[in-house]
Amino acid sequence: MLRRLVRGIGLPLRGTLFLLRHRRLWLLAVAPLLLNAGLYVVTLILFVRYYDVGFGLLIDRPEAWYWLIGYYVLRLLGFHTGYFRRANQIQQRIRHVNLHGCHFPDTSLS
């Protein structure tokens, strides 16, 4: 398991070295990089902007300071639970594509 972890950490370095040796491929590598970075930034901005609204639909923000502690702990747990659940679903989809080809059995992530 540790060997796979070290190999996985080294893969971006190997890819970077490959691109440095083949400079003609830089333009082909920049487009997906910029697209992914842009989508990540937009998603992060929208998530941060609307997370408060979405969580506010579930639980009202309390007035007392001692209830606020529990409220923010619950918000943090909800954020992490939702993030890791979504990341696990995406990881399962990638594993399915790697094993069975390029088609998805269903189109929903829920």
Image (tube, grey):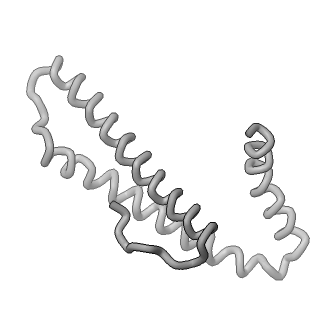
User: Quadrant location of residue 110?
Assistant: bottom left
Locate residue 69 relative to residue 15 in the image: left or right: left
Query: In the image, residue 81 lies at what x, y percent?
Result: 36, 41
Query: In the image, residue 45 lies at what x, y percent?
Result: 37, 57
Viewer-proximal residue, 38 or 94? 94
- Residue 29's place in the image compared with 67, above or below, is below
Question: Residue placed at 60% from the left, 76% from the top?
Answer: 101
Locate residue 44 relative to residue 22 in the image: left or right: left
Query: In the image, residue 21 lies at what x, y percent?
Result: 90, 71
Locate residue 2 relative to residue 52 in the image: left or right: right
Locate residue 46 relative to residue 101 in the image: left or right: left
Viewer-proximal residue, 91 or 29? 91
Q: Residue furthest top?
A: 66
Query: In the image, residue 20 lies at what x, y percent?
Result: 86, 68
How many marks overall?
0
Question: Residue placed at 11% from the left, 29% from the top?
Answer: 62
Image quarter (top left, top right, bottom left or bottom right) of the N terminus: top right
Question: Residue placed at 79% from the left, 63% from the top?
Answer: 15
Q: Residue furthest right?
A: 21
User: Quadrant location of residue 61?
Assistant: top left
Viewer-proximal residue, 6 or 96? 96
